[in-house]
Image (cartoon, rainbow, N blue to C red):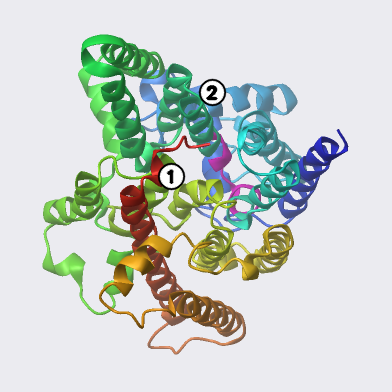
Amino acid sequence: MEKWYLMTVVVLIGLTVRWTVSLNSYSGAGKPPMFGDYEAQRHWQEITFNLPVKQWYFNSSDNNLQYWGLDYPPLTAYHSLLCAYVAKFINPDWIALHTSRGYESQAHKLFMRTTVLIADLLIYIPAVVLYCCCLKEISTKKKIANALCILLYPGLILIDYGHFQYNSVSLGFALWGVLGISCDCDLLGSLAFCLAINYKQMELYHALPFFCFLLGKCFKKGLKGKGFVLLVKLACIVVASFVLCWLPFFTEREQTLQVLRRLFPVDRGLFEDKVANIWCSFNVFLKIKDILPRHIQLIMSLLPACIKLILQPSSKGFKFTLVSCALSFFLFSFQVHEKSILLVSLPVCLVLSEIPFMSTWFLLVSTFSMLPLLLKDELLMPSVVTTMAFFIACVTSFSIFEKTSEEELQLKSFSISVRKYLPCFTFLSRIIQYLFLISVITMVLLTLMTVTLDPPQKLPDLFSVLVCFVSCLNFLFFLVYFNIIIMWDSKSGRNQKKIS
């Protein structure tokens, strides 16, 4: 009983760290005319409250889409409307049409930060706690330690409570989806994941693993019996949830098309900001934007993840599939934002107790990859403190430096296969240790250089590009690593176990 009391302490620690970070600056603070993501979220409350539903996604004199126009699915708009009703009750000036643009005050900041915390408390944090409690074959102490490390992951905290967004809502729904289908509550899991997609379209990163896992369950039950019934029920749940969310936008064809155009901005090109994916990182050497037409860029950006999943449709565990597929989409997708790495970080958090060394390494790199954005928002100190806290928690909880053997890294089967042809191949774990050391030193040095040195006048984005390139190389390594685990685990049959 005392140990479960510690779970409450862990949640309180997570909440304290979150609120402490929220006391710092946010995206676009005091930077007119566009301000930043904080203003975008406030503006969406203004638009959804003052305009009829049919005008939310259309350009008009009251809704200039160039000024933070809505570009997330309907569920985000409904959430903004709910927050707007509360804001109207407290201070109508916060959401007054036109005149509230760029509104900044301590009272409003407190309100906005509180809405993030409440969403976290209602959706994400309960899912994390329940997931850790449902983990099998580990002690209660390890379950509590796992919850602590997940709740201290700095990337999500810095973006939601520093930069300002509501990623915990979509990620929380996705985690509820993982919990549902892992516990054979497939209908509830599917509903939760549909809510995640209808909150943020980037949750499509996780859609293929969900689809394949559920389809595999239907095949296993037999498509002429229980499997077919399950398939029909799943289809009904998916269709019903989407219809309910999109109902106001299904009245006219142009309404639906306009929302889709806002959700998938193909016309913006392959990438915009400095993001640690393939297209942006290698654009330094090869100007992909200038060489390929946009429609060809779009096709190429989707191929790698799709091919990977076709070649390995059912030979891996669900959690590792989520990691591999999300990372593939992040590296090769069209119009990726730096914050999209959180979609990979969530499933990596789910395997933290299984491969603590590699998971901790990845989560550190994922936070580092957002360094240019965090520095822009004046969040250097919170970034350093939360990253150190997370790293210490992982080292203390999992003794990660003691878990670098081939077996702990889940590379034993791979190494045995390689040693059949190269008997001297006995140094894989040592290579990974050295790579980790090099990676950490590089991240620290680049952080110090970015903070203390001025870039050359001819290369003003030098340090941002280096951060992207180094992060991208790390992510490519992790993509290979996770795919090796998936392929060799499928041969050993270990991944046929339940996800939990």
In terms of depth relative to the viewer, which is nearer, 216 or 456?
216
Residue 80 x %, y %: 54, 29
Q: In this view, does 223 lie to the left or right of 19?
A: left
The N terminus: image quadrant: top right
Marks 2/1 in contact by CB < 8 Å: the verdict is no
Residue 22 x %, y %: 72, 50
In terms of depth relative to the viewer, which is nearer, 382 or 302?
302
Residue 169 x %, y %: 55, 35
The reply to whether residue 95 is in sight is yes
The image shows residue 460, relative to residue 42, as above or below, that is below
* Displayed quadrant of residue 232: top left
Q: Which amino acid does label 2 sit on?
A: Phe
The reply to whether residue 276 is in sight is no
Q: Which amino acid does label 1 sit on?
A: Tyr
Residue projecting furthest to the right: 2
Residue 345 numbered mark, or none: none
**Circle 1: is it few (<14), some (14-19), or many (20+) Cα within 10 Å?**
some
Residue 30 x %, y %: 63, 57
In terms of depth relative to the viewer, which is nearer, 283 or 10?
10
The answer for how far apart the CA atoms under marks 2 and 1 are is: 17 Å
The number of discs equals: 2
The image shows residue 306, relative to residue 359, as above or below, that is above
- Tell me which segment is drawn in magenta: 159-169
* Displayed quadrant of residue 294: bottom left
Q: Mark 1 points at which residue?
A: 67
Tag 2's secondary structure?
helix
What residue is shown at x 53% (from left), y 81% (from top)?
A: 446
Q: What secondary structure characterizes most of the magenta part? A: helix
